[in-house]
Amino acid sequence: MYDRINGFFFFKVMYKLNGFFFFKIAFGSRAFLSVRSILLSGTRKKVWDSEYKSGKWNYLKQLDELAHYSIIVGYFNYLKAGGSILDVGCGEGILQERLSPYAYSKYVGIDISDEAINQASQKKDKKTFFIRAETNIYTTESFDAIVFNESLYYFDDPLKVLKEFELSLNRDGIFIISMYKGARGGLVEKLKSSYTFLDETNVTNKLGASWICMVLQPPNESL
């Protein structure tokens, strides 16, 4: 029931990214706990690599996780069909698996975990790439859409991160964001007040887990 990391005990981890862990409890709900102040970046990376290698995150491919991936894909296909896409915190590349191979001109997935990228790279082709990178500093290309699938709220300053990633958006580009409900209270409102809000969809699975999926655009941009 517990995991031990660097001498500290935690409830069994079910999901993690960029230093925050949250846990699956009764009826599929999740509770949140920051351990960023405890674990150094290198130690976190080793833990994540070990977990990806053990298959700990395979449950993300299951049916009860499908809905929010499908909304992301739907938004991309409707608004930027055939465009380029950057997947920030891509893990093993599950979002890429949900996309039709004809849906995009270029897909780039970035993640801090070497093991996740190694597994995802099996899907690499001439227009699909997976890169080990710090997810808050990757700005070497520009894209039609940038996706944060349950990753944005793990940054210390999510709005600052989005501002930095604006440099990686093509003109009229969009952010597609999926967030588990209950994470980082108030963040949704801050996003809507800081960006042009295009649409929002709420989805809930049979376990009662819910996500907010939204499309945002930097101010002064228009589709």
Image (cartoon, helix red, strand yellow):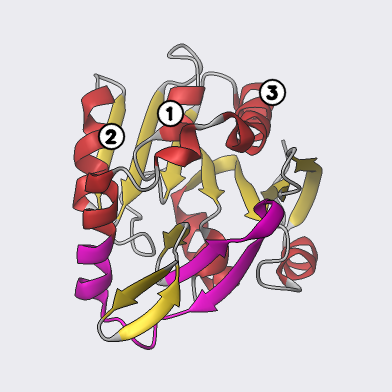
The residue under label 2 is 120
Residue 6: quarter of image = bottom left
The residue under label 1 is 96
- Circle 2 Cα neighbour tier, 10 Å, few/some/many (<14 / 14–19 / ≥20): many
The residue under label 3 is 78
Please state which amino acid type lies under the numbered disc 2: Ala
Q: Earlier in the sequence, mark 3 or mark 2?
A: 3
In this picture, residue 168 sits left or right of residue 209: left
Residue at the farthest top position: 102
Please state which amino acid type lies under the numbered disc 1: Gln
Name above or below for residue 211 compared with residue 16: above
**Image marks 3 and 1: residues in contact by CB distance under 8 Å:** no
Q: Which residues are magenta?
A: 20-47
Residue at x 44% of width, y 61% of height: 16
Residue 188: quarter of image = bottom right
Element carrying mark 1: helix
Q: Is residue 42 magenta?
A: yes
Q: Where is residue 200 shown, x and y percent of the image?
A: 80, 45
- Circle 3 Cα neighbour tier, 10 Å, few/some/many (<14 / 14–19 / ≥20): few
Element carrying mark 3: helix
Quadrant containing the N terminus is: bottom left
**Image marks 2 and 1: residues in contact by CB distance under 8 Å:** yes
